[in-house]
Image: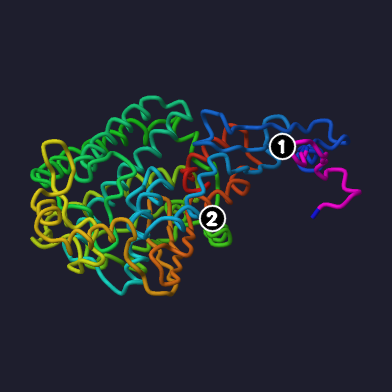
């Protein structure tokens, strides 16, 4: 609260339109300004419009020469307000919102949110739906890691890494588009299951993807892993050991590159991950180099998981049978794309007034969720993605709060960067691989 003698208090004056306030950013000298006794200190803004800040991120760096003496992270430039907006939408509509947080791993947000809603409802998605969730998430993990590799390569000047990374990502996005109808922001995972079953031919196309990708991953290793410049830009850069990771709450590849095999798919399994055969890649380098190696190894592990998911796909429903929850339960692929099945439209429009009323209420009002609160974490490509969901018994969430790994992991920026060169800040941020949509949710 400001006082009258506060030099930075907002001024005001009365006008014919009401009271007008004049707000100034007068705290620059106190917060970021240079000390007049430090002639060699230079304060530099890197971002938020900068090609190497890995998104709409602002870094305020104190420099002595090219050495970073202090690094501060400034966030909030995307200001999406997604968490608050969910309170004004139905439980099913929430899927359309949360998928836009970490827009490089949208299916993880959808799945974590729906697992939380299902826990409140006391229901479980059918086995086929759970397997499909694992399938699309692991395809999404590969796509996300490829973007991290591609953008990190671009920021460090390895342009072939960028073009190749996005080339392989297109293969993954083609599969997700075929399965869900969209390349990103799918809203495919719904409370109670998934929006629709796998389309005809999708399994064969996924197997073709599995046949191609191992050689593409090996190509990245031939291109980058033995490259002296790539090694010198990443080795011993952005150092953060296990103690630092745990103290800051850092998870994901950054933590595993410090030697701790912490992966929620193993330690707190969900969707039957405990029945799959896969490893948790780790290194003990604690630097950007180790994070690169961990992500490359995780792509191979995801390929193994996708193959196993395909092998265990059994015929069955992809949405719970409860008609008071299942929405949309009657979708089909037509010549014009995704839409309601004609059989369902015929039933609700011409055969049953009760079915039409139920359909109308389910779409416009939504279903009720028993009062309570839950926290459900899953392992996203960036670490622990947790959803704290609160219901007051109504048709809309009372509160949705997300533990986004990008937001938490960005705390490590100062620890990784201070004492290093300004050029190493770029490599350190790229090795965290933050997505600002999740940070500024």
Q: Quadrant of the N terminus?
A: bottom right
Task: Tell me if residue 321 comes above or below residue 57 in the rendering.
Answer: below
- The residue at which mark 2 appears reads as 241
Q: Residues within 10 Å of mark 2 (few under 14, many from 20)?
A: many
Q: Residues within 10 Å of mark 1 (few under 14, many from 20)?
A: many
- The residue at which mark 1 appears reads as 62
- Name the spot of residue 197 as percent of width and height, x first: 15, 53
**Residue 7 shown in magenta:** yes
Q: Nearer the viewer, residue 120 or 156?
A: 120
Q: CA distance from mark 1 to mark 2?
A: 24 Å
Task: Tell me if residue 356 comes above or below residue 294 in the rendering.
Answer: below
Label 1 vs 2, first from the N-terminus: 1
Q: Is residue 301 left or right of residue 377?
A: left
Q: Nearer the viewer, residue 375 or 151?
A: 375
Mark whose residue sits in front, 1 or 2: 1
Give the color scheme: rainbow, by chain, secondary structure or one colour: rainbow
Q: Is residue 161 left or right of residue 323?
A: right
- Name the spot of residue 276 as percent of width and height, x first: 22, 63
- Magenta stretch? 2-21
Helix, strand or loop for disc 1: strand
**Residue 15 shown in magenta:** yes
Q: Nearer the viewer, residue 83 or 297?
A: 83
At 27% from the left and 72% from the top, the residue drawn is 123
For the image, the number of numbered tags is 2
Task: Tell me if residue 198 comes above or below residue 172 in the rendering.
Answer: below
Helix, strand or loop for disc 2: loop
- Name the spot of residue 158 as percent of width and height, x first: 42, 27
């Amino acid at each position: 609260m400001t006082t009258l003698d506060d030099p930075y208090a907002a001024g005001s004056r009365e006008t014919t339109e009401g009271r007008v306030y004049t707000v100034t950013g007068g705290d620059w000298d106190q917060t970021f300004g240079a000390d007049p006794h430090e002639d060699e200190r230079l304060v530099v803004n890197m971002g938020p419009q900068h090609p190497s800040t890995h998104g709409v991120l602002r870094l305020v760096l104190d420099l002595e020469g090219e050495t970073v003496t202090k690094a501060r992270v400034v966030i909030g430039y995307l200001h999406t307000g997604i968490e608050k907006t969910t309170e004004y939408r139905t439980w099913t509509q929430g899927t359309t919102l949360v998928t836009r947080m970490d827009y490089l791993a949208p299916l993880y947000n959808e799945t974590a949110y729906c697992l939380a809603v299902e826990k409140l409802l006391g229901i479980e998605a059918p086995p086929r739906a759970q397997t499909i969730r694992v399938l699309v998430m692991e395809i999404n993990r590969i796509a996300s890691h490829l973007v991290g590799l591609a953008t990190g390569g671009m920021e460090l000047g390895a342009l072939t890494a960028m073009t190749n990374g996005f080339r392989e990502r297109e293969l993954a996005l083609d599969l997700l588009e075929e399965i869900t109808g969209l390349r990103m922001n799918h809203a495919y995972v719904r409370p109670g299951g998934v929006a629709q079953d796998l389309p005809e031919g999708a399994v064969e196309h996924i197997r073709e993807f599995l046949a191609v990708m191992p050689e593409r991953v090996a190509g990245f290793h031939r291109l980058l892993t033995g490259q002296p410049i790539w090694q010198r830009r990443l080795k011993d850069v952005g150092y953060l050991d296990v103690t630092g990771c745990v103290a800051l709450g850092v998870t994901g590849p950054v933590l595993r590159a410090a030697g701790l095999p912490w992966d929620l798919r193993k330690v707190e399994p969900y969707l039957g991950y405990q029945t799959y055969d896969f490893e948790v890649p780790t290194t003990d380098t604690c630097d950007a180099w180790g994070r690169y190696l961990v992500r490359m190894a995780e792509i191979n592990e995801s390929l193994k998981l996708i193959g196993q998911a395909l092998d265990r796909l059994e015929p069955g429903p992809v949405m719970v049978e409860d008609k008071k929850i299942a929405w949309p339960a009657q979708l089909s692929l037509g010549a014009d794309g995704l839409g309601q099945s004609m059989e369902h439209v015929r039933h609700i429009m011409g055969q049953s007034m009760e079915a039409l009323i139920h359909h109308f209420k389910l779409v416009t009002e939504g279903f009720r969720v028993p009062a309570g609160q839950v926290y459900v974490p899953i392992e996203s490509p960036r670490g622990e993605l947790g959803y704290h969901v609160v219901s007051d018994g109504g048709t809309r969430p009372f509160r949705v709060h997300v533990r986004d790994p990008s937001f938490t992991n960005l705390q490590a920026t100062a620890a990784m960067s201070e004492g290093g060169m300004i050029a190493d800040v770029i490599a350190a941020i790229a090795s965290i691989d933050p997505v600002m949509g999740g940070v500024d949710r």
